[in-house]
Amino acid sequence: MFRPKVPTMPQPTGLTTSPAVVEPTAVTPHAPAPASTAVTPARNRPAVQLTPGTVLALVGGGTAVVLVVGAVLVSMLLAVALTATSVAVCALTVRSFIARR
């Protein structure tokens, strides 16, 4: 029930044909198509339109990202500080035990 099913590749039967030989052909360049005479006017509209709502959303999103990244970095720093403190306390304890002997 839980055994993997390994697909089997079917073996070719009968005679196989050799691949077809591809012969090179000459490439003849053709003249480019004539350019159209009607030119569309360029738009003076910016590619991205920023409305007050989108600006507010961007500022809010950026603030949220900064807060989350800051919280992660502060928690990592706190974890390192706690680890260093506990290692220092253990080292002092072991040193005091060794000094008593």
Image (spheres, rainbow, N blue to C red):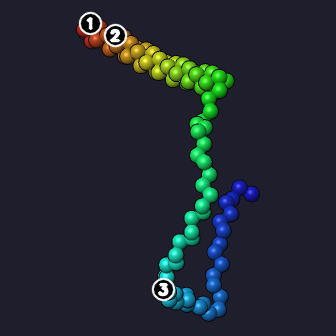
Q: Mark 2 or mark 1, which is nearer to you? A: 2
The label number, if any, that marks residue 26 in the structure image: 3
Mark 2 and 1 residues: CB-CB less than 8 Å, in contact?
no
Q: Earlier in the sequence, mark 1 or mark 3?
A: 3
Residue 44 vs residue 83, the one in the foreground: 44
* Residue 79 visible in the displayed image: no
Nearest to the observer: residue 26 or residue 42: 42
Q: Disc 1 vs disc 3: Cβ atoms closer than 8 Å?
A: no
Image mark for residue 100: 1
Tell me: 88 left or right of 68: left
Secondary structure of the residue carrying numbered label 2: helix
The crowd level at tag 1 (other Cα within 10 Å; few <14, some 14-19, many 20+) is few
Tag 2: Cα neighbours inside 10 Å, few (<14), some, or many (≥20)?
A: few
User: What's the amino acid at mark 1?
Assistant: Arg
For residue 93, the mark is 2
Q: Amino acid at mark 2?
A: Thr
SS class, disc 1: helix
Q: Residue at x 49, y 19 (%)?
A: 70
